[in-house]
Amino acid sequence: VPLILPRYTLVSSIIVWLLPGVVLITIPKVLASYTVSRGMQRWNLFVTGASCVTTVVSAFWWIPRMGIEGAVAATTCGYAMEALVSLAVFRHLSGAGPLEVLVVTREDLRIYAGRVMGALGFKRSPERTL
């Protein structure tokens, strides 16, 4: 961005701070549906509360020191806390470890491919696997 649009140099540092948070926030967004499907919505409140406290405390610390970049860093910290707590809640409720949630396996790919092919109207032969 600085080479093409020098007026927007600050944007590139903001993106660097925000990108990890954007990736991390996908974890609790997916795992929240699991707790709802199990009828345990109260756990999502706990996860969100931990995230909110982390974001507010981080914001009070970093915004005066770093300005807009501090606000983005505080947001990313909140997202990271939400991801960690949601993984802990998921482990507590399901017994599955974090790697079982975060690492895509061959079986996952086979299931996804079958669903995509089915959605597109193709019949998948039972003997074909990835």
Image (cartoon, helix red, strand yellow):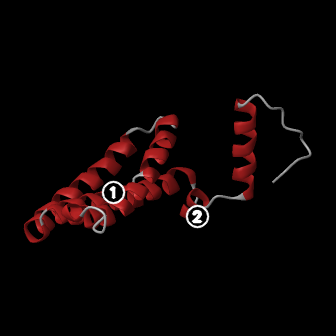
Residue 51: x, y in percent? 29, 54
- Viewer-nearest of discs 1 and 2: 1
Q: Residue at x 25, y 61 (%)?
A: 11
Relative to 34, does residue 95 appear above or below in the rendering?
below
Q: Secondary structure at mark 1?
A: helix
Residue sticking out furthest to the front = 4
Residue 117 location, x and y as percent?
75, 36
State the residue lying farthest toward the right. Answer: 127
Q: Please give left or right for residue 105 compared with residue 4 in the image.
A: right
Q: Does residue 58 appear in the picture of this structure?
A: no
Residue at left offset 69%, top offset 44%? 112
At label 1, which amino acid type do we have? Tyr
The quarter holding residue 22 reads bottom left
Tell me the residue at 26%/61% (across/down).
5
Labelled disc at residue 119 = none
Q: Please name the residue that numbered disc 2 is placed on.
A: 99
55 on left or right of 27? left
Considering the numbered disc 2 on the image, is that residue within a helix, a strand or a loop? Answer: helix
Q: In this view of the protein, which residue sits in the foreground, 85 or 92?
A: 85
The quadrant of the rendering that contains the C terminus is bottom right
Callout 2: few (<14), some (14-19), or many (20+) C-alpha neighbours within 10 Å?
A: few
Side of 14 relative to 56 (left or right): right
Q: In percent of the image, x 61 and y 60: which residue is there?
A: 100
| Residue 40 seen from this side | yes
Name the N-terminal-most of marks 1 and 2. 1
Query: Could you give the CA–CA distance between mark 1 and mark 2, rounded to whole angstroms?
Result: 19 Å
Q: Quadrant of the N terminus?
A: bottom left
- The quadrant holding residue 73 is bottom left
Residue 102 at x, y percent in the picture: 56, 59
Q: How many marks?
A: 2
**What kind of residue is marked 2?**
Leu
Judging by the rendered image, the residue that carries numbered circle 1 is: 79
